[in-house]
Image: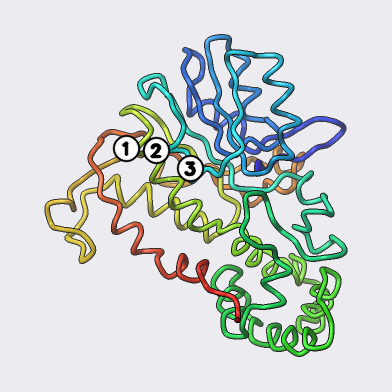
Amino acid sequence: MSATIKLENKHFPVLLNELISIISPLYGGTFIDCTFGQAGYSKKILEKKYNKVIAIDRDKDVYLYAKELEKKYKKRFCFKNIKFSQINNIKIKSSDLKAIIFDLGYSINQIKDLNKGLSFKSTGKLNMKMGLNDFSCHEVISNMTENNLIKIFKFFGDEKYSKKIVRKIIEIRKRKIINTEDLTKIINSIKRFKNSKIDNSTKVFQALRIFVNKEISELINGLINAFYLLPIGGVIAVVTFHSLEDRIVKFFFRNYSEIKNPSRYVPNKDNNIRCFKLQNNKPITPNLKEQKINPPSRSAKLRFATKISNESNFEEFKQKFKYLIDIENLQFDK
């Protein structure tokens, strides 16, 4: 799910130079690219001949880019079609691992793929599956209860008009199957804004993508499992694109890099565990030049942390965002 945009046959990975300076690939080591996408980060890392990359992505369609690197770099690159929450299943000599990278955006190719239906500009049947999914957006819109749809739109999209939009969906789905064009029309009939900075459908589509792909639990489990796989001195770097996922990453790094007051979630003896060292409290964002070349990068935020301890207790992290995981686990109407 790499947030890369293709312009004039070139790929522009977001915050590439900043990320490379953080993970320091000059002196060799193994790097895990958890969101391989169009290979932007992996290609840059592999330019140094002593580096190895293990790339993973749930989207099997990106294997086209992986095949090129497998052929070119042979023993220094391998690709696995798995979710990044399954990173703990990768067999690797931990001491060789330098950094684990997450880029949580969607590539322009994925957004424009009509079969995936990730964009409100898509046509036809609702889908939004990124790979290795249990259900599609069509099933959500067709079968989810009114109250559950409202929760999805409200908490995953911060959609102010959730109730009105959902009531319209319930009304229309009684007489027809709702496709992508129908959904955008429903949203526009409720949100009749002309001069909004973002499209009226943006928040609802974001919410549905998160729900269909279980992006919250993927991120939480991915971060925790990355910590366990990484040796002391290794780096976790994450590029986020909306406030919900950035809030999760920010909490994970900050909460486990500071000496905290007693928490009601964990025993007192575990409150003083410091897992990470932070070099920057504030996220790194694209400069104006990058934003001009690659407009989707405007919302990107890069956060990173260095592992300083093998001790951990992530119960507070899990409990903090349990309400979001509970929403991801909502069941369809029987």
- Name the residue at 18% across, 53% down: 271
Sequence-first tag of 2 and 3: 3
Q: Say what amino acid the circle numbered 1 marks.
A: Lys
The answer to which of 39 and 212 lies nearer the viewer is 212
Q: Give neighbour class at mark 3: few <14, some 14-19, many 20+ (Cα, 10 Å).
A: some
Residue under circle 2? 305
Q: Which residue is mark 3?
A: 86
Disc number placed over residue 277 in the picture, else none? 1
Q: How far apart in space, not on screen, are marks 2 and 3 (Cα)?
A: 21 Å
Question: The residue tagged with tag 3: helix, strand or loop?
Answer: helix
Q: Write the residue at 62% across / 50% down.
A: 132
Separation of marks 1 and 2 at Cα, in angstroms? 6 Å
Tag 1 and tag 2, C-beta contact below 8 Å: yes
Three-letter code, disc 3: Gln
Q: Is the C terminus in the top left, top right, bottom left or bottom right quadrant?
A: bottom right
Image coloring type:
rainbow
Which one is closest to the eye, mark 2 or mark 3?
3
- Label 1 SS: strand
Numbered tag placed on residue 112 in the rendering: none
Left or right of residue 95: residue 136: right
